[in-house]
Amino acid sequence: MAVYFIQCGQDGPIKIGTAISPDMRLIALQGGHWQQLTLLAWHEGGRDAELALHARFQHLLIRGEWFAPTRELMDHIASVKPSAQSASESCDPLLPEIERYLIDQQIAATEFGRRVLGDPTLVHELRRGRECKIATRERIRAFMAAQAA
């Protein structure tokens, strides 16, 4: 589990939340948001770590889990960045492409896996860290390219 910091727009509010995959959470949030969202940083931690940050920055709370992007909060996020790996390193690099495809094509993850490899658990397993062989990646990408064309 990870605690993430996602910013709305260039200088908009920052959401402090938790997710198994910050990259996937970003894609999910972006699907329902009119402004560009950016994953600023993330670090390991669960709900307790998230709630501790919410309490620490309570005076910056705008609404829900969205906080004002003050120097104090931005400094905290900057302190997280050096020790945090890129969020895309936490999951299969193909996964963000698949997630975008699922949203664009309005197809269920299980149906996608069934159509591509005959495996309805494919996307679920990728979300949990499964890695694919190069030939499998190429097959998945070829499927998405053919369907999108």
Image (cartoon, grey):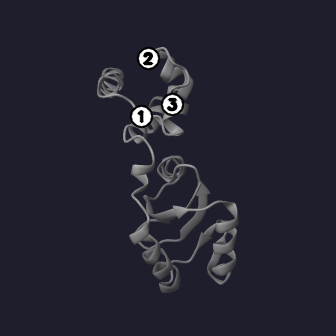
Look at label 2 and name its amino acid.
Leu
**Label 3 neighbourhood size at 10 Å, few (<14), some (14-19), many (20+)?**
many
**Label 1 neighbourhood size at 10 Å, few (<14), some (14-19), many (20+)?**
some
Residues marked 2 and 3 touching at CB (< 8 Å): no
Q: Is residue 104 above or below residue 57?
A: above
Residue occupying the point 67% across, 70% down:
63
Q: Is residue 135 left or right of residue 102?
A: left
Q: Nearer the viewer, mark 3 or mark 1?
A: 1
**Label 2 neighbourhood size at 10 Å, few (<14), some (14-19), many (20+)?**
some
Residue occupying the point 54% across, 39% down:
128
Q: Quadrant of the N terminus?
A: bottom right
Q: Position of residue 58 (x, y in %)?
A: 68, 79
Q: Secondary structure at mark 1?
A: loop
Look at label 1 and name its amino acid.
Glu
CA gap between label 1 and label 2 equals: 14 Å
Give the number of the disc on residue 131: 1
Q: Position of residue 93 (x, y in %)?
A: 37, 42
Look at label 3 and name its amino acid.
Val
Residue occupying the point 32% across, 27% down:
141
Residues marked 1 and 2 touching at CB (< 8 Å): no
Where is residue 124, by image quadrant? top right
